Image (cartoon, coloured by chain):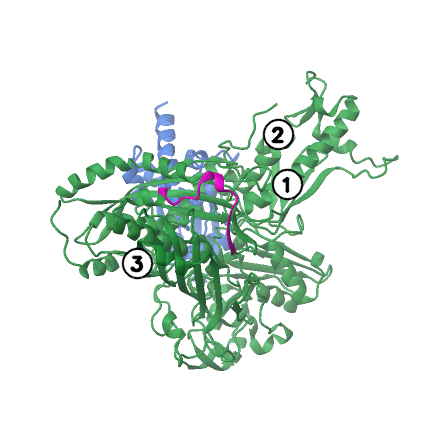
Amino acid sequence: MSTRQFGQRVLRTEDPRLLRGEALFIDDFSLPDMLHVAIVRSMHAHAKLLRVDVSGARAHPGVTAVYAADDLGALMKPGPVLVPPPPIPGSTFNARTQTPLAKGKLRFVGEPIAVIVASSRYVAEDAAELVVVDADPIDAVVDLDAALAPNAPLVHDDLPSNLAAHVAQRRGDYAKAREAAACVIQRRFRYDRGAAAAIENRGVIANWDARTNELTVWDTTQAPIPVRNALASSFGLSESQVRVIAPYIGGGFGPKIMFYPEELLIPWIAMQLGRPIKWIEDRSENFVGTTQEREQIHDAEIAVDKDGRILGIRDSFLHDTGAYDPYGLTVPINAQCTLLGPYEVPAYESEFTVVFTNKTIVTPVRGAGRQHGVFVMERLLDFAARELGLTAVEIRRRNYIPPNAFPYNYEILYQDMAPLTYDSGNYQPALEQAIKLIEFDRFVEDQPKLRAEGRHLGIGIVSYVEGTGIGPYEGARVRVDPNGSVTLATGVGTQGQGHFTSFAQIVADQLGLAPTDVRVVTGDTREMHWGTGTFASRGAVVAGSATHAAAQRVRDKVVRLASELFEAAPDDIVLDGGRAYVRGSPSRAISLGELAQKANPLRGAVRPGTEPGLEATSYFGPERGSTANGVHAMVVEVDPETANVRILRYVVAHDCGNVINPLIVEGQIHGGVALGIGNAFYEKLSYDGNGQLTSASFMDYLLPTALEVPPIETVHIETPSPLNPLGMKGVGEAGAIPVAAAFAQAVESALARPGFEILEIPLSPSRLYELLEAVPQEPRAR
Amino acid sequence: MPNIKVQVNSKEYTRDVEPRLLLSDFLRHELGLTGTHVGCEHGVCGACTVLLGGEAVRSCLMLAVQADGQELTTVEGLAGSDGTLHPIQAAFREAHGLQCGFCTPGILLTLVPFLREHPKPNEDDIRHALSGNLCRCTGYHNIVAAARLAAEKMTSSKSA
């Protein structure tokens, strides 16, 4: 029997095509007679839209068509609420979603107003300049606190205020916990995030074939099946008439899960004009037209006893959803739930208010609100530890949920609408491994000596959990072809996570193959037409488990057929190297291809109930998500003169259950950490008072480069999940979640100035300098 | 429309082009060499990097007409005609130096002249060389490892 592939550092099967430049991304497709699109977008954050005059653009040579809201007919209705809010008693949710093009009012810079269709993108952009947008500006709603003031301008005039939602969840009795506390820490935290900034922007190509009545759409989506469903229902087509293909995608990170106006408009225009239509987003559109994550403001307090044990937490926060709220409450609920972390919190009172503002829509970006919650909790623990004279390590150690307490139920609802229950976990080992790897004790010894030499080094160490692998379900189909090739199709799209390899490993183990023998098809609705998409660190867990189940069923079919042919017991059949044989007689083998032919007879009779071929489709839906966890630690050096921070070491000890491919998992963590470093110190979406994004290019919005991201050392701890047969938990977002919390702790440790506290993210050298100026000068080194 | 003649990956092309056509769009949409990717169109991300006369340039910051009479290499020109990966490409696979693969062509082509001029680079050299290429997936960790591995492969094959 060949080596088990699950758990091996298998090199990726998709790489050669990507490395040779052969893999096809959205803008690499070209169809005969294709027309190109440019979109006219709002320059105003908030304005009355009086008139859109497209006559000049229509008359421009090379322009085929121009559409404004009035040209869309029945298409002009608000889009769907993609994620309905969980049924939390007493909560309010005001759903407001975008129409495909703006009409009557402009609500954010970047909102689409008109679509130009022309012979080339160059011509389309020329014509876009000729569209006259007559708009009467209104004061923009930008600041979260001001948005809820009684006389604030309204983003949606039909609502009494800018309140989009309000949710309160509680466990236990916080007031009692507070009374019993030896120490209560209360702070206001501001945590801002930014753009996903995938290096590939979005794009859509659509082709309507009037002869077959079939619509084919190529789309940079993380969720091809929901896009297919939405298009079919919008156009009155059956789902089998619409094929959505998510080709190779140049990074997703969350915002490509949305259903955007362009994803509806481009296919609709293709049907109107009977010609293939292509729209490729450019970077400046991406900064304003693609969803982001932004600020939450938390007023939080923690009550601890004299030993530093958490008695309770109270938190009330504001969440910026932007101009609309199509993604429901996923981001603030993630913040609310993930705040609890790996800790026992007997009493928790948390409420949040979601606020409409005149900014780009907020939907999940890698981490999806979890960062905000983790920052609040970890900072509260840091300040409580300081107050009680404990180390950052000790206060965490004292509060972990013990390994015998799982499943651990927090008695509040999570984003998947199931109770927030951790499936399994063992939190102490990650902390101890991180301490060991970063040489925590040695650092504590060395720090004063370095200080005496005038060097300001600091250490940060924090914990987090990540709810992953949520439902509802995914499917997979495995098939052996008569030529012996094995194909797996899943419905999830792929954006670089290595699905082609990880899923192939799972199939290979069942059928006795090498991963390179398995052809994996992802994100083509014709190949697998049930499913939901790639989000919430769920691909490996949910689609991986479905793949495992389908491959097992194909294995059963292969073994049954081979045992009949060889007149041997099924248990004696060995599958190896694409062949089946009876144990001990490998010379008398039959290939999988021959078995596939025999499983599909073209004449004669079969036993009633026989399914043709060696093929199986299986689905997997976990009862709830599985909870991964980890500890991040970093050593930084701060230059107090310039307030620049260099990260000298970065350590991640993490537990995502059983690992399919350590190489890929480490890569996921590295990338997450880099995104977290960007969030902590470099990336900021700066909106001015008029709601204009002033950092809308890579010159102003700084992604970390190879010089800012240090080498990242990783340790795997494997606590299997009981919720799926392979014991997996998700890992896609983990790396990005606790970075800013660790960064804040490390920078404080490096500077050690009384009264200096970091209560906000992102920082930057200039912002850190301002914060330092506001506290008294450091005392002489001890 | 101006007529230009370029040699790309050792093949000659003659085309009429609009003066404003970007070199990146020319390569991708006129010549069909879609391996060169476009990420920002303002010269920051480096995904569109190609070789012009052997040196790395950003094809989104050049016009096609500026390349008239010159010799270019794109990612399609790195592997052997039988598909055998160039040592840098092979190192990226071995070290898991790519995830979504979108920025990868630009990074490969940045490394070609860098490793030619710095056959034995240290980590700092590599990180500086890569600092003009943005990657959102890998955190650069394995890209740096891949560049080091590529340098080793190329020096040992030369000395062999």
Q: Residue at x 56, y 73 (%)?
A: A66
Q: Residue at x 22, y 56 (%)?
A: A756
* Chain holding disc 1: A
What residue sits right under mark 1 in the picture? Answer: A488
- Decide which of B14, A90 is in the foreground and name it: A90
* Chain holding disc 2: A
Report the amino acid beneath label 1: Leu
Pointer 3 and pointer 2: residues touching (CB < 8 Å)?
no
Q: Colour of chain A?
A: green
Q: Colour of chain B?
A: blue
The CA distance from mark 3 to mark 2 is 53 Å
The CA distance from mark 2 to mark 1 is 13 Å
Q: Which mark is residue A556?
A: none
What is the x, y in percent for residue A631?
38, 42
The answer to whether residue B2 is visible is no
Report the amino acid beneath label 2: Leu
In the rendered picture of this protein, how many numbered marks are placed on residues? Answer: 3
What residue sits right under mark 3 in the picture? Answer: A759
Magenta residue span: A397-412
Magenta span contains residue A407: yes
Q: Secondary structure at mark 2?
A: loop
Whether residue B94 sits left or right of residue A529 in the image: it is: left
The CA distance from mark 3 to mark 1 is 48 Å
What residue sits right under mark 2 in the picture? Answer: A513
What is the x, y in percent for residue B43?
36, 55
| Mark positioned earlier in the residue sequence (3 or 1) | 1
Magenta span contains residue A335: no
**Callout 1: few (<14), some (14-19), or many (20+) C-alpha neighbours within 10 Å?**
many
What is the x, y in percent for residue A684?
34, 60
Report the amino acid beneath label 3: Leu
